[in-house]
Amino acid sequence: MTDARIALGKTGEDLACAALEQRGYEIIDRRHRQRGGEIDIIAKDGATWVFVEVKARDSHEFGEAVEAVTPSKRRRIARLAIDYATRHRLLNCPCRFDVVAIHFDDGNARIEVFQNAFDAF
């Protein structure tokens, strides 16, 4: 992965956290890594635990950012979330999956938050 791509991802996650906090989310963890992958953001929205995938794009060359959350990516994130919930004794708590899509158009960030995103695909 190039330095530019890493920087884009970090900037996207920073913007996503700010957007989620403006909506009232409490950020619990960022870049939660475990065997099998990473969950970009773990947050709480009221009593609901939210596992957030962030996709940032600097162009539309490869489509919309949200389209990059493929079925296999959703399955991987779901497995990671189940493992996290099991380890933290959250299995009886409400949980959902959100996606934050960020496009940098003309130097300006356009941020979209898709709640219950895995149900929408």
Image (spheres, grey):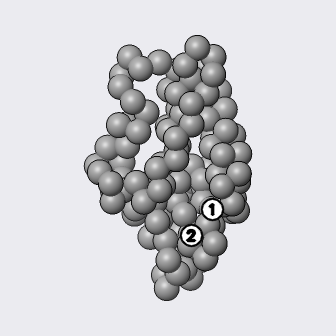
User: Height in image: 91 above or below 113?
Assistant: below
Question: Which sits earlier in the primary sequence, circle 2 or circle 1?
Answer: 1
The type of residue carrying mark 2 is: Trp
Q: In x, y percent, where is residue 71? A: 28, 49
Give the residue at mark 2: 49
Residue 83 in view here = no
Q: Are marks 2 and 1 in contact (CB under 8 Å)?
A: yes
Residue shown at 49% from the left, 71% from the top: 95
Residue 97 in view here = yes
Residue shown at 47% from the left, 18% from the top: 59
Q: What whole-number distance in Å separates the C-alpha atoms at marks 2 and 1?
A: 6 Å
The residue furthest bottom is: 92
The type of residue carrying mark 1 is: Ala
Q: In x, y percent, where is residue 4? A: 61, 19
- Mark 1 falls on what kind of element? strand
The residue furthest top is: 106
Left or right, 101 with reference to 74: right
Q: In x, y percent, where is residue 89? A: 56, 82
Give the residue at mark 1: 43
- The quarter holding residue 16 reads top right
Q: In x, y percent, where is residue 81? A: 47, 65
Residue shown at 61% from the left, 35% from the top: 12
Q: Foreground residue, 38 or 41? A: 41
User: Height in image: 10 above or below 32?
Assistant: above
Label 2 crowd (10 A; few <14 / some 14-19 / many >=20): many
- Mark 2 falls on what kind of element? strand
Residue shown at 39% from the left, 30% from the top: 64
Q: How many marks?
A: 2
